[in-house]
Image (spheres, rainbow, N blue to C red):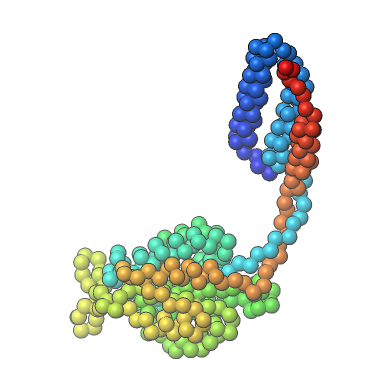
């Protein structure tokens, strides 16, 4: 069955109509000039169909007639991007407008749009960690889960950075196994204010470094910090009744990036490190390419194009004296 590589016929048809109008204008102008000089313009008649046929063949070549399918190898070297987002209560702090979590949410939505050909996954953490969205090429699904981020997603508890990193580490396929593609670059983007009341991170970071995964940390918040609001205008208070002041803690986030070859960037009302982060993520390349076979329509544009060029060459070679002096 004949198909077309470019089935939108609107622009080609408009070009064909314009070409016919120009040809008609040329014929009428030549006829008027011949009559004014008392000559016959009939010698032009046999060249006009030649040019119209050449134009029609060029139009067909433009549309790309295709018959059947042929397998073609496609090489890809994609990345896996894990977005690890802190949804603890401290992310409600308003020292980054409107809140730490809402600002991070907006930046992550932009990040997802920049990597349409890569797999993305989403992990949330607080006192525990959970996979909100497994690795997928479906950008809309990732965006949907990002839109649902809230500090009420997980039970309250002491924030731990180790739990989400171990969760991601367990999802990494060992190189050379059937569990996943080998040589696929993996980046872990941790978005947090750095509060960590968990265990020692060293063993987890060493395991991530051995796997080849790189951790990029985004520190959301300010050193001055802010008090944590509650519904009704109240504030979160500690055991003795004093308002809790939450500050950005950069040290754990700097450790994540330094020990895995990643990068630390700040995110607050004065600094937005996402531009540098996006540049580093785009620069990452998989060490091994995947080869996939896809069915591609066999475009047959060459034949009508060759015939059209041949007719145009014939038109140029054969000259016709339309008006004799």
Percent from the top left, x then y, of residue 92? Answer: 31, 70
Residue 269 higher or lower than 57, as above or below: below
Task: Give above or below for 119 relative to 177.
Answer: above
Question: In this view of the protein, can residue 45 be seen by the observer?
Answer: no
Residue, x 30% and y 75% (percent of image)?
A: 222
x and y percentages locating residue 67 in the rendered image: 77, 43
Residue 313 visible from this viewpoint: yes
- Residue at the spot x=55%, y=70% of the render? 283
Q: Residue at x 77, y 43 (%)?
A: 302
Quadrant location of residue 212?
Answer: bottom right
Could you say which quadrant of the image residue 1 lies in?
top right
Left or right of 317, for residue 236: left
Residue drawn where x is 21% and y is 78% of the image? 243
Report the label total: 0
Image quarter (top left, top right, bottom left or bottom right) of the C terminus: top right
Q: Position of residue 143 (x, y in %)?
A: 47, 60
Nearest the camera: 305 or 285? 305
Residue at the farthest front position: 325
**Residue nearest the observer in this picture, 284 or 26:** 26
Q: Is residue 179 above or below residue 113?
A: below
Q: Is residue 57 left or right of residue 152?
A: right
Residue 147 location in percent, x, y? 42, 60
Q: Which of the two residues, 176 or 13, is positioned nearer the viewer here? A: 13
């Amino acid at each position: 069955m004949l198909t077309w590589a470019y089935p939108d016929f609107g622009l080609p048809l408009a070009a064909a109509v314009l070409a016919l109008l120009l040809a008609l204008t040329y014929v009428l102008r030549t006829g008027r000039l011949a009559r004014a000089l008392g000559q016959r313009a009939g010698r032009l008649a046999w060249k006009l169909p030649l040019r119209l046929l050449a134009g029609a063949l060029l139009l067909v070549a433009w549309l790309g007639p295709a018959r059947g399918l042929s397998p073609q190898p496609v090489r890809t070297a994609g990345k896996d991007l894990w977005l690890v987002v802190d949804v603890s209560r401290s992310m409600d702090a308003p020292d980054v407008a409107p809140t730490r979590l809402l600002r991070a949410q907006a930046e992550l939505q932009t990040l997802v749009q920049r990597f349409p050909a890569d797999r993305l996954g989403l992990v949330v953490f607080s006192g525990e960690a959970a996979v909100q969205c497994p690795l997928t090429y479906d950008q809309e699904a990732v965006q949907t889960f990002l839109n649902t981020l809230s500090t009420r997603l997980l039970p309250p508890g002491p924030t731990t950075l180790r739990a989400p990193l171990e969760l991601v580490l367990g999802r990494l396929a060992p190189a050379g196994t059937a569990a996943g593609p080998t040589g696929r670059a993996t980046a872990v983007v941790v978005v947090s204010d750095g509060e960590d009341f968990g265990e020692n991170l060293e063993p987890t970071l060493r395991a991530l470094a051995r796997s080849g995964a790189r951790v990029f940390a985004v520190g959301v918040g300010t050193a001055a910090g802010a008090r944590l609001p509650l519904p009704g205008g109240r504030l979160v208070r500690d055991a003795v009744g004093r308002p809790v002041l939450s500050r950005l803690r950069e040290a754990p986030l700097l450790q994540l990036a330094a020990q895995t070859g990643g990068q630390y960037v700040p995110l607050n009302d004065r600094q937005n490190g996402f531009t540098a982060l996006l540049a580093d993520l785009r620069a990452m390349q998989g060490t091994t390419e995947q080869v996939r076979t896809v069915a591609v329509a066999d475009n047959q544009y060459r034949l009508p194009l060759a015939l059209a060029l041949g007719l145009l060459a014939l038109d140029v070679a054969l000259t016709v004296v339309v008006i004799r002096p």
